[in-house]
Image: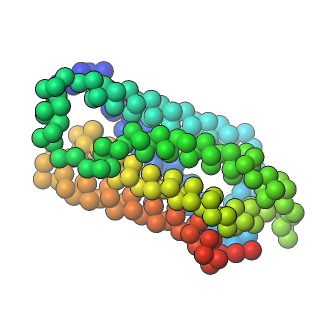
Amino acid sequence: MHLTQSTVGRKILMAVTGLLLVGFITVHLLGNLSVFAGPDGINAYALKLHSLGALVWVFRLIMLALFVVHIYFGVTLSMENRTATPVNYSIKKMVKTTFSGESMLYTGLILLAFLIYHLLHFTLQVTNPGISAHALPLDAALRPDVYTMVVLSFQKVFISLVYIVGMIALLLHLTHGLSSFVQTLGWNNGPSLEKVGLGGKIVAVGFFVAYVAIPVLILARFVKV
C-alpha cells in the first residue's frame, strides 16, 4: 500500500507522542508505587509534587496535549485505513495482525475515558469527595493524607475494577504500540521483527503487573490503613 508523505509524517508524530507518553507513565508509575512504602512514602511524594506549584499543572497540560494529539492521529489514520480501496484490504489480509493491533483505536479511546476518570478521581478529587485528601485529616507529619485516600478508594470494588480495566487497555495498547513505534521509525529489519515484538510484550506486561498490583493488593487487604 502506498503511503503519502502526509500519512508517513502523521505516523511518525503518533509514534513520537506515544513514546513521550510511555515516559510519562513510567515516571507516574514510580510515584504511584510509593504507596507500598506506607504513608511516609506517598504522602511525602505528593507533598513534593504540590510544592512545585504551577509547574505540575504545566506538565500535566503538556501530557494531556500529547495524549490528545496521539489520539487524534490514531483516529484519523484508522479512518483512512477503513476507507481504503479494496486492493488495500486484500493486501492487509496478507499481513500478520494481532488482536492488540486490530484494537488499537478502541483501547486508545478506553484509555482516554480512563484518563478523564483518573483526573476527576485523584487529581481534582471530585468523584469521591468523602474520602478525598481534602476531606481527610492531615497525617502525623501534617501532610495531606494521600495514602489513606488511595487505600480507601481501592478498597471499593467498583473503583478497583475501573482501574484494572484501564490497565488491561494499556496492556493491549502497549503490546502493539511499542513494537509499532520501532517499525514506524525504521529501527528494525526483518530478522529483528520478532525480537522487537517480544520486547514490546515484555515491557507492556511489566507496566500492567506493576500498575495493577496497586488496586489488587489494596483490594485484597495486603495494603491497608
- Residue 172 x %, y %: 38, 52
Residue 150, image x, y percentages? 69, 62
Q: Residue at x 44, y 35 (%)?
A: 70
Please provide percent x and percent y for residue 64.
57, 37
Q: Is residue 205 above or below residue 176?
A: below
In the orientation shown, which residue stands out farthest toward the bottom?
A: 222
Residue 107 visible = yes
Q: Relative to residue 3, is residue 216 drawn left or right?
A: right
In depth, the one of 162 and 125 nearer the eye is: 162
Quadrant in the picture for residue 220: bottom right
The answer to whether 158 appears left or right of 70 in the picture is right
Examine the rendered structure and indicate whether residue 28 appears above or below residue 138: above
Please identify the quadrant where the C terminus is shown.
Answer: bottom right
Which is nearer the eye, 7 or 20?
Answer: 7
Q: From the viewer's side, name the closer residue of 9 and 151.
A: 151
Q: Nearer the viewer, residue 218 or 54?
A: 218
Report the residue at 26% width, 59% height from top: 198
- With 126 as the anchor, is 193 left or right in this view? left
Picture residue at 23% right of the left edge, 24% below the top? 84
Q: Is residue 95 left or right of residue 203?
A: left
Number of marks: 0
Residue at the location (41% across, 41% down)? 106
